Image (cartoon, coloured by chain):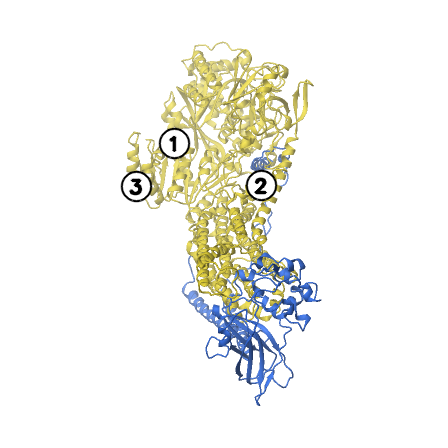
Chain colours: A yellow, B blue
Amino acid sequence: MEQLHWVRFRCQQLWAANHTQGWYSPPRPVSDKYSPQRSAGKRRTVLARWGPHQDEYHSISKSYRNNRIRTTKYTLLSFIPKNLFEQLHRVANIYFIFLAVLNFVPVVEAFNPEIALVPIILVLLVTALKDIWEDQRRFRSDREVNRLKCSVYSSKERDYIDCCWKDVHVGDFVRLSCNEIIPADMLLLHSSDPRGLCYIETANLDGETNLKQREVVSKMEEMEFVPEDFHWRIECENPNNNLCRFRGYMENPSGARVGLHNSNLLLRSCIIRNSEAVVGIVVYAGHETKAMMNNSGPRYKRSLLERRLNTDVLWCVLLLIVMCLTAAIGHGIWLKQLKNPIFEVGEETSPALAGFYVFWTMIIVLQVLIPISLYVSIEIVKLGQIYFIHNDVDLYNEHTDSRIQCRALNITEDLGQVQYIFSDKTGTLTENKMVFRRCSVYGVEYPHYDNGRGGAVLYKPVPAQCLGQCNMVCLPHNRAAKEVVPDCELVTKLSWLCAPDLNVAHSCAKASSSLELAFITDFFLTLAICNSVVVSSPAQSLNVLPQAQTPLRSLEEIKLMFQRFNLSALPALPTLPPPLKSSLYISTLDSVVHPVGVMDAPGEEEVPKLMFPEAAASEDAGAVEPEDTVLYEAESPDEAALVYAARAYHMTLKARSADSLQVELPTGGTVQVPLLHVLPFDSNRKRMSVVVRHPLTGQVVVYTKGADSVLMDLTRSPTGNQHTQKHLDSYAREGLRTLCIATKQTLEEEEYEVWLKTQLLAESSIENREELLLCSAQALETNLTLLGATGILDRLQEEVSETIEALQRADVKVWILTGDKQETAINIAFACKLLCPSDQLLTANCEDKVSSHPHVRTLELYNSQQESCAVLVQDFLHRVTCYVAGSVLVIDGHTLDWALQPELQGDFLELSKHCKAVICCRSTPLQKSQVVRLVRDKLKVMTLAVGDGANDVSMIQVADVGVGISGQEGMQAVMSSDFAISRFKHLRKLLLVHGHWCYTRLANMILYFIYKNVMYVNLLFWYQFFCGFSGNVMTNAWVLILFNLIFTSVPPLIYGVLDQDTPVDVLMAHPEFYQRTRTSKDYVSLMFWLNILDAFYQSLVCFFIPYFAYRDSDIGELSFGSPINASALFIILLHQVVESHTLTWIHGLVFLLSAGSYFAFVLLLSVFCVTCSPPTNPLGVETMQMSQPAFYLVCILTTVTALLPSSSLRSMELVRVHRAWKAHTVKQPH
Amino acid sequence: MITAMMASSYNAKEEDGHHSGAAGHGGAGADKSRKPDNTAFKQQRLPAWQPILTAGTVLPAFFVIGLIFIPIGIGLYVTSNNIKEFEIDYTGVDSKSECYACARNFSWNSTTPCTCSMNFTLEQPFESNVFMYYGLSNFYQNHRRYVKSRDDSQLNGDPTALKDPSKECEPYRTSEGLPIAPCGAIANSLFNDTLELHYVDSNGTKVEIPLVKKGIAWWTDKHVKFRNPNGNTNLTVAFQGTSKPVNWGKPVYELDPLDPENNGFINEDFIVWMRTAALPTFRKLYRIIQKKSSTTPTLPSGRYILSITYNYPVLSFDGRKRMILSTISWMGGKNPFLGIAYITVGSICFFLGVVLLIIHHKYDNRNTSADIPN
């Protein structure tokens, strides 16, 4: 299936010759025809189709497209004119047409008109056939899609009736049930879920398989939904392609407005999951849906080689002009010397004019010199190369069952030229399988030693049944993240919370303050609820919120306990919390005792082990899962790791709905936490917050988690932040990912009300919504209390260090661009052997938090004053340039900002050029792309960026070669990449073997192609010296035209696809060979000119040996051409044999077919062509020639003589190369 | 399952301008693994032969080529040397030449043909069949516009083309309102000298040597490509309504009035002329002198007289006319070039083999632990 696709896209690009400029074409809109309606201003109004405002509906909706899609380019009628028109303004075709038209001018006519038309007709025909085939496929799939059924409300039937997708209109009510595909972009108005939720899977849209939650437009869930009575007027944006943004509002006749946002919108081609039935109103249909507007064609990048090829094509043009000029001048002179010759035809023309005519004739005759078909051939070759890359079993990942995806189809050879690799860290070098490793709460560190021991479990293969259960999807990382072994000390402390009677608790609490306990509780509560994970459990359907479990302890006790802690913990609170409504947290009391998780012996002594039987069990049994377990689907693996960590401490997130969360407490009770707001994570704030009403105190509480760099500045801690900071630093040194957890419990009701207003305002605004939301969030996230910090381990992927070592041996510079902390980045760099202890580390850091690494000599830049930073950076860059030799530069985001300033760019590059590696930490996505662009543009090198997350997208797009790693973080990186791999280690073979091969293959193929054309065309050129430069040819015109188009067109392709200049084992074992391709040794101008020279030599031999052999004999024109053509064919084919490094039976077959087709063609022509193709009528020529021994003698002599120099040079070179391989193999047996 | 979905969705995404989102996508390939086949072809592990890789294969190849080529060359050279050839220029450039007068006073319109004769001596007897050629120099029969100026359909006997010749024949397409048959510049410039050969025997009497004028054209040309209109029945009628080419003295149906099999378009002299020569200096077969008996040579050594009816002007463009007598061998006419070339190339191969052997030997000794080639 996929193969078909890439073939198709290859074909599409193949003929698209109008792609000459730019790095890659920006995604083009589907077609102008489908562009959004601009006439209606910036907004669109949607009314219910069968609603009360029928008339208005019709006037408004006239201009909206219905849901029929048509992606075909042509109709039956428009095909010929449109297709012709499209083809006729492509450069290559224009060249062909120019030649064909030129041939119709009688004075310059070289061939019969029909022969000159062959190339262009062939090209047009092939393209048209391909277009028809493609359009037919589109038409079929369009029809299939248009005929899909969905149930749409009809006012006549007063019910939902089945209807084709194409008949859905804007304003229709569509009812969908579970697993149905959404036919158009709709606003969710009703869901069978009591909370008004529904889940959609967007895999069809963006490849992300986790479920996204969508909610019914607020206020709508409260009322009964009756389609007839829907009198709201929907105002929303005009159709656009932003998948993550939807703004608008709904207004009822009384003027009340409800804000609409992205979570209300069901997108076309997503699938409804876990929801019985939903009803929505269509707002965008057909081509105006976001899914359709997001469809951009495949990326087109131009490879370096292709760009260089263009200069050589220009040389060919020059050569052509020179040859034609020579002929023109020669003809003029020749004509001038002639006096009244008997063979002169027609009236006398002046030599100058005749020369001018001959110039154009010669351009027709020698047209093949311009290798227009080379472009087509290159595309085909790349298709073949990609086929082999795609099929490489070494680039296949068993675990995820994924192959490499080649998305950009025409830059294969750039893989062989890479000089700089920019790598993301998380998920690229590392597994992105997060394991909760350590935490620090209240300034106390809990090292979780046992957790480290459990690490071995992580490498156990993921059982298949974990991959998919019911409708719900769980990612493999969840399992790894689940296995958290709690820290004993922390368990002990937590267990006091559950002490059966308060006295015991008090006595225990003496050991640590009750404040600390409150911190610990809040810490884990934050881990459990401050996230966006979707909870699902195999036993229950997602949309039913499970009933709160019976607490084992009486509610009163819990309440009391919390009150006690809160009182002591936060003295600022009112002395007593307001009385709680029972509905807030406990819905029912049930007599059923929950079997798992909590011990049920209230009177026992508090023994931590007993408190956590599960924990004890998991220590022994590792991966034993409790039966009734909940599964979490998180957007990022960190979140999942934290939630699982909280669960390990029995702060279990049991279920979530739009407005509440259900959490099981360590004490055994399940409480419902009313969720007031979620301020989602964004890369500016680098934190996320939830606003909840505390289940027990009833107060509005903000829980925040985020990057330590931002949160440390926003928080204060009763014990001071220094301890935590120390722990954070040590975590970072261990290579852990750090997060800070904070809370804000001092939020007064009035304060909250004020904030709520701004928040609501922000949410409902259409313009500036993002800015307002940001402001609002920042207003809330102040005066936070630091609860603690977490350290999450992210394991290195397998063979990362080997890969990096190999790449460095291949003289490829590896830079790490990461958003992580400096210490973390340095640690990972050590782990993957990018850094070795002997390296000198240059740290450029504008902030004052510089910690030197113990293993390396460090040169540091200290500064806390931002203003003078620029000066210091400059100073730094100048100062250290003298120190660098094999050193590694570490630069952080702040400093990078300065270093990227135009004034300092040069210095920065100069320094980094001398460094072995560069590590940019704390860099933003923008900085990543800036760095890549800087290196790419200023150093003029081939860059490769590899990453897995959305934050790498810009970098991937900027780099010459973008590689996406299909990992845990969705498909955005993959979607924007040129190649998508599943493991970092695949880069090794991709670059060292496939890159090398693709490059040498293509380079050699191009050289061969040009050689072939020059060689053949020169034969015709030499003949001009003997026919008065009149533009005559000694070959039948058909043979001449088809020689390049058919007889010798396949061998170069085979050469470009199959040749292996160095065996795979040598390339893998000796990355040094990569330099050879990287420095473009195979395709430098010297090689180009050597090839041209060889072609000249061969054509001289190929022409003049027959010339001397047949001189002054009764040889006819075509009889003379016959041995020349035949030997040219042999020479061209055998030249490839000489140039090839490997020959397989495929080569043999192709050579046979090529030669066979030529001889079959000329023989048939010479037997059956009685009066055809005047004036070069071939009747009897070949049969006569081939019956004479002289023909064969000439062919053999010509072929051997022509190939003599190239084959002897080649053999000498090959002997040398082989010896080198042998030397390597001896040194390092593999 | 997950990845299958991802992959299929990626496919859906890739559909240019088209987003089906059809249900079919999810299921496809859900069961079978996407692992590439581990076949030799797909993994690029096809057994491959690396040509000319070791000294062990290169050197013998050179030596073998040398060893084969040199004997062939010698054979060819000897064969070529055994061919007897005699050539005589009768253009009449030199004032001493017998044909000087004819050459000077040439005019296409003169009704009285100018004749001249030249004496020559064959030093050696010509044993086998002797081929008599006329040779022209500096005659660009391969000029593009000249080559085009013919109508193969007309020559093939197509009656419509006879009355309405191809435009390619312009300006020799019509004459005085009538279509020219055969039209075009090639036919118009038909070589029209008549050559006769006399042997002067020891008594001084001239013996005319019989010249065979049939069998000089290719079989395919004579029988397939060239046809008279309406078969070979009355050619005068067949060519009625056509005009003779401008330069011709007589119409096409009078080219050989005695032999209907050699008249009209299928006249062999005409056919030979119509097969345009490849190079500006060329010869065309004129007559064959058949060997009469195995005992006497076809052309004994001695004095000969070549009588020329001088019709064909070449002086204006510095052309030359020659008469060539030649025997032929299995490889054609006399041409020492091929033999010499074979010997030369064979020797070069041999030499290269030696050089490579030396280089190989030296390289082997000097550098056994070679570095990576750059």
Question: Which three-letter amino acid code belongs to the residue tagged 1?
Answer: Asp
Question: Which three-letter amino acid code belongs to the residue tagged 3?
Answer: Val
Q: Please state the horizontal and vertical placement of residue A744, each as a whole percent of the image.
A: 43, 18
Q: Name the front one of labels 2 and 3.
A: 2
Q: Please state the horizontal and vertical placement of residue A1135, each as a whole percent of the image.
A: 52, 60
Q: Please state the horizontal and vertical placement of residue A442, each as a whole percent of the image.
A: 41, 23
Q: Which residue is mark 2?
A: A83
Dot 1: element: helix
Label 3 is found on which chain of the structure?
A
Separation of residues labelled 1 and 3 (CA atoms) = 26 Å
Q: Name the front one of labels 2 and 1.
A: 2
Q: Which residue is mark 3?
A: A880
Question: Which three-letter amino acid code belongs to the residue tagged 2?
Answer: Asn
At 30% from the left edge and 32% from the top edge, which residue is drawn? A869
Relative vertical location of residue A57 with respect to residue A890 in this rendering, above or below? above
Q: Residue furthest right?
A: B233
Out of A1109 and A449, give the one closest to the viewer: A1109
Out of A620 and B216, give the one closest to the viewer: B216
Quadrant in the picture for residue A74? top right
**Labels 1 and 3 positioned on one and the same chain:** yes
